[in-house]
Image: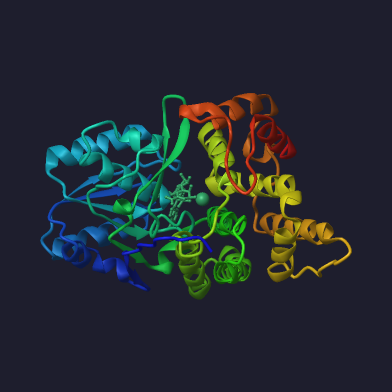
Amino acid sequence: MENFTFYSPTYFAFGKDTENQAGQLVKKFGGTKVLIHYGGGSVIRSGLLDRVKKSLENENIPYIELGGVKPNPRSGLVYEGIELCRKEGVDFILAVGGGSSIDSSKAIAAGVVYDGDFWDFYSGKPIENALPVGTVLTISAAGSEGSPDSVITKEEGMFKRGASGDAIRPKFSILNPALTMTLPAYQTACGVTDIMAHLYERYLTNTKEVEVTDRLIEALLLTMKKEGARAVFEPENYDARANVMWAGMMGHNHSCGVGRSQDWRSHCIEHELSALYDCAHGAGLAIVMPAVFRYSLKHDVMRFAQVAVRVWGCEMNFQDPEKTALEGIDAFQKFLISIGMPSTFADIGAKEEDIPKLVDVLCHGDGRDGTIYGFVDVNEEDCTNIYKMML
Ligand code: NZQ
Ligand code: ZN
């Protein structure tokens, strides 16, 4: 196991009606003027926004609002939010929504206290300072409620890039599983896929002897296989929603990724798809992961065979472990299709003729050096082959 540091100070309030604690929690973490940042309107329609505002009013905390965050959040609204916070003297950002609203909030929080262009953080500069951020989560997916990460799309050039820093880990996150019951089945399934991707991309490691994190990941994948499917097909099942919600947080707050190398190629390869075609991140991952895994199989057949046996119930073929490994990838893809996820390029509106452009932005956009690093490093030719495997 490699050396690591792990700092995860987020306070979680989990369970029914916890959104009513928003005001008290903002106060606890020192907020005196709040920006409530949210998406396209689901939180208005569900009545959640009103409950959160009431909770702030009960604590006499003034607030302003900025809605309109799009899935795959854009830089334009981040600039707008930074200006607004500076003008209004905001000292706390409260995201109400999914990963997109949370990531946009984190970007604003880092940008307000920075003299330069906030995009510097999305071009590799670590985030060291930010206004405090709190979240009220409405979809189990991105894991941003516990993560030090934020992903934003720069409209100019449509680059989708991530930034990181413990300073943007939420001070608190309110997780009420019942809030996710209004999600359409497709969106729930996209979230299930994203959570499983965060687990798989930590599982694919070149570090030896990391049993504790291997086993944690396997437990969470097994949970997602059962509870993820239940959440899709029984949308009002509180316990399924609750298990998925906590698995999503645990899968991405990094406790499963410490001390081991990781593999974020599927996310990088997917981000270009959701940037160009504006598909849901989870839907993109559903077509990317099986292709990346099959392409990388020979690098470590036994790792793929291990997850096939331990998670997907495949029988180990000791004469031909590659067969077991492939069966595991097939079982994972079948599972994704069974919950309504796409399996080909065409399913998400992607086009073969765009592959050179996708590869160019992926490998060279915003200063990248031509290689995507991970479990196996891949170059332009590899990425072209991987995209072609999704046709
Ligand atoms: O915008 P509204 O109207 O709220 O609708 C949203 C949106 O259309 C809707 N929705 C959310 N909660 C709902 C609901 N509809 C009905 N009822 C509810 N309870 O769902 C749609 C998707 O929302 P979004 O916030 O985009 O979803 P998600 O949480 O999947 O976030 C996706 C973004 O997170 C990034 C992705 O790349 C993508 O941009 N990621 C962020 C990460 C991080 N910060 O650590 C890691 C992830 O790997 C991921 O890359
Ligand atoms: Zn993701």
Tell me where residue 147 sits by quadrant: bottom left
Number of callouts:
0
- Position in image of residue 206 (x %, y %): 62, 55
- Residue shown at 37% from the left, 73% from the top: 15
How is this picture coloured? rainbow
- Position in image of residue 373 (x %, y %): 57, 42
- Residue shown at 74% from the left, 51% from the top: 297
**Whether residue 3 is situated above or below residue 41 in the rendered picture:** below
Q: In this orientation, does residue 390 appear?
A: yes
Tell me where residue 61 sits by quadrant: bottom left
**Whether residue 156 is situated above or below residue 337 in the rendered picture:** above
- Position in image of residue 133 (x %, y %): 27, 54
Location of the C terminus by quadrant is: top right
* Camera-side residue of 106 and 187: 106
Q: In the figure, is residue 95 to the left or right of 191?
A: left
Q: In this orientation, does residue 47 appear?
A: no
Residue lying furthest right: 319
* Camera-side residue of 5 and 105: 5
- Position in image of residue 42 (x %, y %): 39, 52
Q: In the figure, is residue 147 to the left or right of 336?
A: left
- Residue shown at 54% from the left, 59% from the top: 260
